[in-house]
Amino acid sequence: AQSVAQPEDQVNVAEGNPLTVKCTYSVSGNPYLFWYVQYPNRGLQFLLKYITGDNLVKGSYGFEAEFNKSQTSFHLKKPSALVSDSALYFCAVRPMDTGRRALTFGSGTRLQVQP
Amino acid sequence: DAGVTQSPTHLIKTRGQHVTLRCSPISGHKSVSWYQQVLGQGPQFIFQYYEKEERGRGNFPDRFSARQFPNYSSELNVNALLLGDSALYLCASSFTTPGSPEAFFGQGTRLTVV
């Protein structure tokens, strides 16, 4: 069985400062890893994915994520936060080596960027 | 390009009733999945369909069922609604190529059971 842990319910950061949202995962075999963002009363918006290759992946809106296989982590980062980045962020995983496409999500981290 | 579209956006039902939720995938996507998101939690996988066949099912009771049509659109049906079925129901579509594993989500259907 696969699982995702997002240890922080909320992350607070000042605008212009770097941000990190943490994610660790457990999966059999190699993982596909994803970050999604959710704004109030909306669906999930895809930010970025890790498939293979470079451990640092770049995504939408200046976000990037660092894959660390030994620590089974996939932390979301941004060098300079914007107030408009305030939203709910979800990390998700699914195994690469099966035909099943079911995503397992973390519980979410609320990012609050203060002006 | 149109994204994943879901209908209706909001729905209020009474306990014991039946509900049907609908989803149209992104053009070219043949895989559709359904998720339930209870307030304050991450989405939970319900079903995955590919080429009109069920390819995966989450830990949900038999009151939940789904199907996929020849045009790849999908319906989620829930019978004998319970108060605990109140949630945001999300549909996602995706390609089935290894290089494009990401799923794209619709805006969801907010179901309230009273």
Image: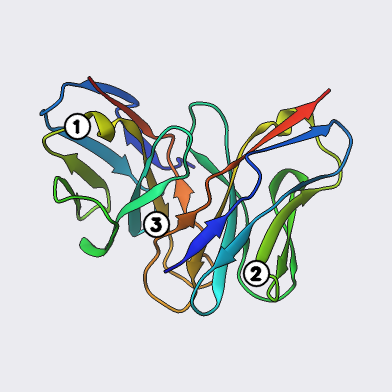
In what element is the residue under mark 2?
A: loop
Seen in the image, is A77 located left or right of residue A109?
right
How many neighbours does mark 1 have within 10 angstroms: few (below 14), some (14-19), or many (20 or more)?
some
Looking at the image, which residue is at 86% across and 40% down?
A: A80
Frontmost of labels 3 and 1 is: 1
Q: Chain of mark 3?
A: B
Tag 1: amino acid:
Leu
In what element is the residue under mark 3?
A: loop
Task: Answer with the quarter of the image where residue A57 lies.
Answer: bottom right
Where does residue A5 sit, x and y in percent of width and height?
Answer: 57, 55
Looking at the image, which residue is at 57% across and 43% down?
A: A108
Read off the residue under disc 1.
B82
Vertical side of B104 occupied by B57: above or below: below
Task: Assign the C terminus of chain A to one quadrant of the image.
Answer: top right
Give the distance between the C-alpha atoms of the residues marked 2 and 1, in whole angstroms.
38 Å
Vertical side of B17 occupied by B100: above or below: below
In what element is the residue under mark 1?
A: loop
Vertical side of A42 occupied by B3: above or below: below
Read off the residue under disc 2.
A72
Where does residue B63 sit, x and y in percent of width and height?
Answer: 14, 45
Read off the residue under disc 3.
B28
Tag 3: amino acid:
Gly
